[in-house]
Amino acid sequence: MIRADAPLPGFDPACPMSTFPIQVGGKWTAMIVLCLENGPRRFGVLRHHLRPISAKVLAETLSAMERDGLVSRCPLVGADDGGVEYRLTSLGRTLLDVIEHMRAWARDNIGELARARDSFDAHPRTTDEPRHRPAGSG
């Protein structure tokens, strides 16, 4: 049985997931999936835990995830405030393994990724010099 009061995962502000080159959905989707792994959560709990996300961005992300069938929005029976909670659907739960593989890749490669970005940023280019060749440009 999933405990609703199970602790939420910790996210370091410098977490590679926030600048990760591979994303599931939007920037916050994977972190929301991880927050819902152990059970449903209310909007306020998610927002508090996922600081610095704004209420607007969290609402937009949850709505997009609901549209994609990753989360369900469930009214809380007997809640005086008309509250709802969000829970992972079976489709959303399939992302847990994908996210764990992405996190493992990040742990294994974050140093090389950071060095590549630093090197790239240290060599400014003129505005007319392309940074990369467009796909299919020969």
Image (tube, helix red, strand yellow):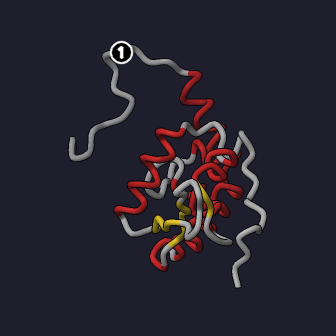
- x and y, in percent, of residue 82 in the image: 52, 57
Q: What count of labels does the image hold?
A: 1
* Between 58 and 79, the one nearer to me in the picture: 79
Is residue 130 rendered to the left or right of residue 47? Answer: left
Is residue 65 found left or right of 47 in the rendered image? left
Residue 112: image location, x then y, percent: 66, 46
Q: Quadrant of the N terminus?
A: bottom right
Q: Position of residue 24 (x, y in %)?
A: 47, 58
Outermost residue, bottom direction?
Answer: 1
Quadrant that contains the C terminus:
top left
> Residue, x 62% and y 62% (percent of image)?
41
Q: Residue at x 26, y 45 (%)?
A: 135
Say what secondary structure mark 1 lies in.
loop
Residue that numbered label 1 is attached to = 127
Q: Nearer the viewer, residue 12 or 48?
A: 48
Q: Quadrant of residue 19?
A: top right
Q: Residues within 10 Å of mark 1 (few under 14, many from 20)?
A: few
Residue 109 location, x and y as percent? 66, 53
Q: Amino acid at mark 1?
A: Thr
| Residue drawn at 55 percent across, 70 percent down | 77
Left or right: 46 as drawn, with respect to 127: right
Name above or below for residue 95 compared with residue 136: below
| Residue under the image location 60 percent in, 57 percent down | 42
Residue at the extreme left of the image, as rendered:
137
Q: Is 92 rendered above or below residue 128?
A: below
Residue toward you, 17 or 86: 86
